[in-house]
Structure formats: structure tokens, C-alpha cells
């Protein structure tokens, strides 16, 4: 089980940008594949992006070309840079291992994209 704390959400206009951060506990962070997930109202939680231990990445089609996942192993932190935001990106964003560990979900950070 890993302790995860997400931050960086907020209200942004369509076309704007946000950078989310996720701080992780523990000394094994660098070997984990990490993911960003999101859950919109009335919808199931979905995988947005994954970064593997050696830095390769995966993106959901809905965010490809707009979002960038990165990690800083020295800081035990994973980031999600979100550009060209759309109203349909509105959701609570969570980080977790990839695949997710059920005991490691944090509170998430709310992202609202609205004019």
C-alpha cells in the first residue's frame, strides 16, 4: 500500500491548462508504474495516462496530444500536465499504481473546466 496525495486541481476555462501533482510515500516509488485516473459525475473511474518505471507512457485516446504524464523519482512525484482542456475533462483526478492498488486511492483533486 502506498500513500498518495494529489494536488493542483481547480477551475479553468476551456482551452486552459493545469498541472496536477501526486506525491507518493515509500522507498519503492521508482519501480512502480504509475497512473492518473479520473471520475466524472455519474461515470466510472477511467485510466487517463500511465508512466512506467523506465519512462515509457500510455494515454487514453481522449487525452492523447493534450495531456503529458511525467515523474520525478527523486521527489517521489508524478505529474499530469493538461493542456487544451475541454468541459468533458471535468472530473476528480486520482493517481495510483498501474494497475491500481485498491488500498492506495487518495482523495483526488477536482478539475472543473467551464466558461
Image (cartoon, grey):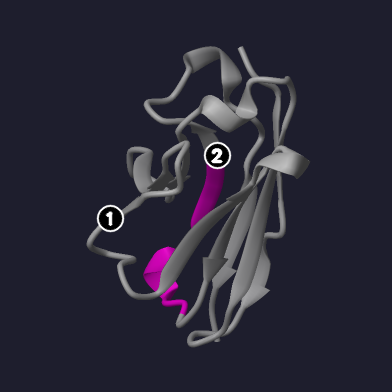
Whether 78 is drawn above or below 5: the answer is: below
Image point 62% across, 54% down: which residue? Answer: 110
Whether 9 is drawn above or below 3: the answer is: below
Residue occupying the far left of the picture: 61
Q: Name the residue under label 1.
A: 60
Q: Name the residue under label 2.
A: 95
Q: Is mark 2 on a helix, strand or loop?
A: strand
Whether 75 is drawn above or below 114: the answer is: above
Q: Report x, y in % for residue 48.
A: 38, 51
36 sits left or right of 65 in the view: right
Q: Magenta stretch?
A: 85-94
Q: Does the magenta stretch include residue 105?
A: no
Image point 59% across, 20% down: which residue? Answer: 104
Q: Report x, y in % for residue 66.
A: 40, 75
Image point 33% across, 75% down: which residue? Answer: 65
98 sits left or right of 16 in the view: left
Given residues 28 and 15, the one toward you in this image is 28
Q: Mark 1 near mark 2, Cβ–Cβ under 8 Å?
A: no
Whether 16 is drawn above or below 43: the answer is: below
Mark identifier at residue 75: none
| Dot 2 crowding, Cα within 10 Å, few <14, some 14–19, many 20+ | many
Q: In the rendered view of the protein, which quadrant contains the N terminus?
A: top right
Q: Report x, y in % for residue 19.
A: 64, 66
Amino acid at each position: 500500500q502506498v500513500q498518495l496525495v494529489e494536488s493542483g486541481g481547480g477551475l479553468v476555462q476551456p482551452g486552459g491548462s493545469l498541472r496536477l501533482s501526486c506525491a507518493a510515500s515509500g522507498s519503492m516509488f521508482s519501480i512502480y508504474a504509475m497512473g492518473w485516473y479520473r471520475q466524472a459525475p455519474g461515470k466510472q473511474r477511467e485510466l487517463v495516462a500511465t508512466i512506467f518505471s523506465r519512462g515509457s507512457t500510455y494515454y487514453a485516446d481522449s487525452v492523447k496530444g493534450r495531456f503529458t504524464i511525467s515523474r520525478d523519482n527523486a521527489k517521489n512525484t508524478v505529474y499530469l500536465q493538461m493542456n487544451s482542456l475541454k468541459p468533458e475533462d471535468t472530473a476528480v483526478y486520482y493517481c495510483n499504481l498501474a494497475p491500481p492498488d485498491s488500498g492506495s486511492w487518495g482523495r483526488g483533486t477536482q478539475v472543473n473546466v467551464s466558461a
